[in-house]
Amino acid sequence: MAEEPGPAGLARTAPRGEPRSSRGPISLEDAREAVLSRAAPLPVEPVPLDCALGRTLAEPAVARQPVQGFDNSQMDGFAVRAVDAASAGERSPARLRIVAESSAGHPPRRGLGPGEAIAISTGAMLPDGATAVVRVEDTRREDDALLVFARVPPGANIRRRGEDIAGGSTVLEPGTRLGAAELGVLASLGAASVPCHRQPRVAVLTCGDELVQAGGRLAPGAIHDSNALSIPALAKLAGAGAVSTGWMPDEAEATRTTIAARLDADVVAICGGVSVGEHDHVKGALAELGVEEAFWRVALKPGQPTWFGSRPGTLVFGLPGNPVSAMVAFLFLVRPALAGLQGSRSERPRTIAVLDNDCDTPGGRTRALRCRLELKEDGWHARVGSRQGSHVLTSMLDADALALVPAGTGALRAGERLEVELLEPS
């Protein structure tokens, strides 16, 4: 029997004789689950720390030693015994003897005794015997003598060993995307490299006799191939490693041959040719090549004619040819797959925004409306663009987010609250 996606994107039995293409669209949530269930993390490899920005951590980062590794000064001043300056004041300064200096990276060779002070720099190691640091602003130096004009309580201006990170603690969990702060923390742990899941290899193919590469001369009826630039760019922003591109004419054998040559990639994204027209050959080619269909058509506007399937080691997406539909389908489905392959299951940031303008939302599908966000006193506000056609690529230029309108929702009025998914890079 044929199979069709069930509630979680898994297979269930379809009525006997029903062609796969005749089934209704799968919900966006089920489509995402079906994709993620097949996006197992790729193998782990060591990555030099200075090359790990944007990568995903594969193993826990554990502190072998505390950070900082020693008590140190919070500011420039003098290390003292707090008892020696317990009664210091403006009119009755404590008088101490300066016996050494502790600067960053150069600790003193001796400790601190009664009535003594050691000049100390910010971050420098606290000398043995010192229980406080007095600010340089509260002192006056007279040759080797130090006058302290303010009482210094024990522990003042000292950063304790392990105050940032305790030895043996787990600092970062697997699945963490490594940004600037994460790289800095790993460096503070003494790491030279970090275990990360391999970046996915992605192949992006565009399909259509009408397509001309960027900069090429247009014949009558031809258009420039915008998907060949926008979709690979989205793949790179989502953490893909090598991204290859290619074009296929509207011809069955060329389609099959071109796709076959790219199935060694971890992810193949094909733009166009996946519908049911006479010149759409992608689905047939994928079936011949042993790519098992998981779903075709998603209850999403734009982006309904999206196909997804897999074979061992490769996830294949058939994206719509319209440029906005291709980008929206990529953002909702391909991008989560790339995150899953890198060991991250984190969802894109979502928030609630107040709608600032009326808009119609006809149809029985979830709508993804391009909108502009503005932060006001009462929170986020969204203004939906007037041009929402799937061919209007310029509608993506001013979009900060996609407003998600549930299926069956009628006209929207200003003041209603919508869930929005942010579009900032991964």
Image (cartoon, rainbow, N blue to C red):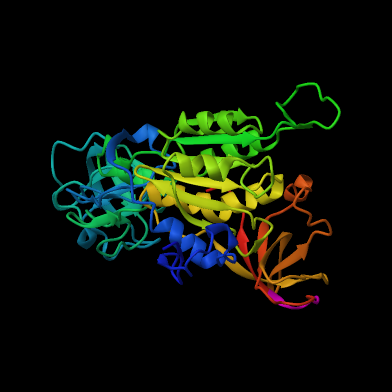
What is the span of residues highlighted in magenta in the rendered image?
Answer: 413-417
Q: Is residue 145 above or below residue 366?
A: above
Please tell me which residue is depicted at 13% across the width and 49% down the height of the picture.
113
Question: Is residue 159 at all visible to an observer of this figure?
Answer: no
The extreme right residue here reads 220
Q: Nearer the viewer, residue 327 or 154?
A: 327
On the image, the x and y values in percent for residue 279 come to 68, 40
Q: How many marks?
A: 0
Is 202 magenta? The answer is: no
Image side of residue 316 versus residue 94, left or right? right
Image side of residue 273 versus residue 152, left or right? right
On the image, the x and y values in percent for residue 8 come to 43, 69
On the image, the x and y values in percent for residue 292 come to 43, 50
Q: Where's the N terminus, which quadrant?
A: bottom left
Please tell me which residue is depicted at 34% across the width and 44% down the height of the picture.
312
Magenta span main SS = loop
Q: Nearer the viewer, residue 295 or 232?
A: 295
Q: Nearer the viewer, residue 46 or 324?
A: 324
Please tell me which residue is depicted at 78% across the width and 57% down the height of the picture.
388
Question: Is residue 384 at all visible to an observer of this figure?
Answer: yes
Image side of residue 285 versus residue 320, left or right? left
Among the 4 quarters of the image, the one containing residue 246:
top right
Among the 4 quarters of the image, the one containing residue 220:
top right
